[in-house]
Amino acid sequence: MGDLKRVDDPQVREMMPFINDIVLGKPIGFTNQQYNLNPQGTVDLLNDKRIRDELEMADFQYEDLKQRAEEIRKRMAEEINSLDLSNSK
């Protein structure tokens, strides 16, 4: 993670909280909440019940979305953990 933090690419820097969540095995949005950062995606915004109410999102829809997001997080974590960074600059 240390080398990744030094990358001077705005897209990579924007993804850092997300990558940190994956590396730590935390739910997506954990780092944003812990450090009071702005949400990075739709799922983060939907953590706020007021937003879900405004969208008239049923609880089962939100739970399904959270489950799917967790499955994606796990797959991404597997992919990131399988990267060979030994030859990176």
Image (cartoon, rainbow, N blue to C red):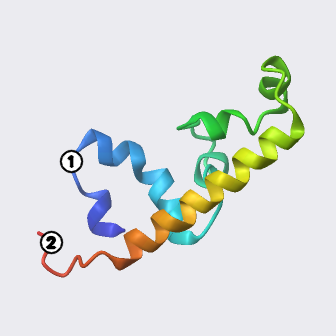
* Quadrant position of residue 43: top right
Q: Is mark 2 on a helix, strand or loop?
A: loop
Above or below 54: residue 62: below
Instruction: Say what amino acid the circle numbered 2 marks.
Output: Ser
* Quadrant position of residue 24: bottom right
* Quadrant position of residue 30: bottom right
Percent position (x, y) of residue 5? 32, 58
Above or below 65: residue 67: below
Q: What element carries label 1?
A: loop
Residue 72 numbered mark, or none: none
Residue that appears at 88% across and 39% down:
59
Residue that appears at 59% across and 46% down:
32
Quadrant of image for the N terminus: bottom left
- Say which label, 1 or 2, has the lower sequence index: 1
Residue that appears at 72% across and 50% down:
66
User: Which residue, given by chain and number where applicable, does mark 1 sit on?
Assistant: 8
Above or below 26: residue 11: above
Q: In the shown orientation, is residue 41 left or right of residue 58?
A: left
Percent position (x, y) of residue 26? 63, 64
Name the foreground residue: 87 vs 5: 87
Instruction: Say what amino acid the circle numbered 1 marks.
Output: Asp
Residue that appears at 12% across and 78% down:
87
Rate crowding at label 1 as few (under 14), some (14 to 19) or many (20 or more) other CA atoms within 10 Å: few
Percent position (x, y) of residue 80? 38, 69
User: Which residue, given by chain and number where applicable, does mark 2 sit on?
Assistant: 88
